[in-house]
Image (tube, grey):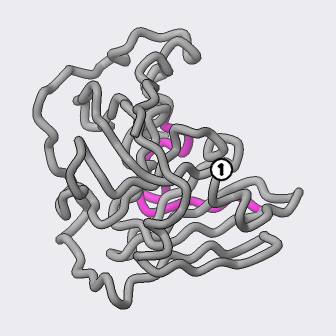
Amino acid sequence: MSTTDKTELHREFDGKRLPPGQRKTSKFPVLSKGSTPDWDPETWEFSVTGAVETELAFSWEEFRDLSNETQTQDFHCVTGWSKFDCEFTGVTFPTLAELAGVDDDVVHVMFSALDGYTTNLPFEDCMRDEVLFVWEYDGAPLPREHGGPLRVVTPHKYAYKGAKWVDGIEFLTEPERGYWEKRGYSNTANPWNEERYS
């Protein structure tokens, strides 16, 4: 499978590859709001709900059968570290949006996760090919501590916008705030503007 390079994304935001206030690391630190949740591939389900033509539900096998791709991305954590050249494989957000048929009045998206975590993004920020629901990291199954079986990656935002252990998305006609956004973190989370806290 070919790999799409998304590491030049910073040019769109008129910034350097390493955003201000970040330090480059070769490690992949683990930060979570709590413990790693259990999951069962036999009962796991991914839901697409809200203001759509067709609400969807996928088993683990069905989700893995969706059209997918591999991308090289950079990863920026709000705590100040960045990891370059991460290879992620998964399903793009626009792929799911097209399957569901999104209503014209959708403005926001809420991501939910197995551990109760939520995070939100404007719809237009989601409709990018590099917003990816990933199950592989560097050619191997995504480690549990990094959000396996499935997490979202958002290389144009700080990584708290990319929910670990993600199990659903809801299309919203009014903005809502997620877990960290309600607790003072930036709602916009642009690394090149250092939008860490609101």
Q: Report the residue at 79% width, 64% height from top.
A: 101
46 within the magenta span? no
187 within the magenta span? yes
- Camera-side residue: 146 or 120? 146
Q: Position of residue 167 (x, y in %)?
A: 45, 72
- In this rendering, the answer to whether 4 lies above or below 97 is above
- In this rendering, the answer to whether 28 lies above or below 73 is below
Give the total of numbered labels: 1
Q: Amino acid at mark 1?
A: Pro
- Camera-side residue: 25 or 68? 68
- Considering the whole magenta stretch, tell me its main secondary structure: loop
Q: Position of residue 86 (x, y in %)?
A: 28, 34
| Mark 1 residue crowding within 10 angstroms, few (<14) / some (14–19) / many (20+) | some
Tell me the magenta residue range.
Answer: 174-189
Question: Could you say whether the residue bearing mark 1 is in a helix, strand or loop?
Answer: helix
Q: Report the residue at 55% width, 55% height from top.
A: 67
Q: Which residue position is annotated with label 1?
A: 94
* Residue extending furthest toward the bottom: 43
Q: Report the residue at 77% width, 76% height from top.
A: 54
* Residue extending furthest toward the right: 104
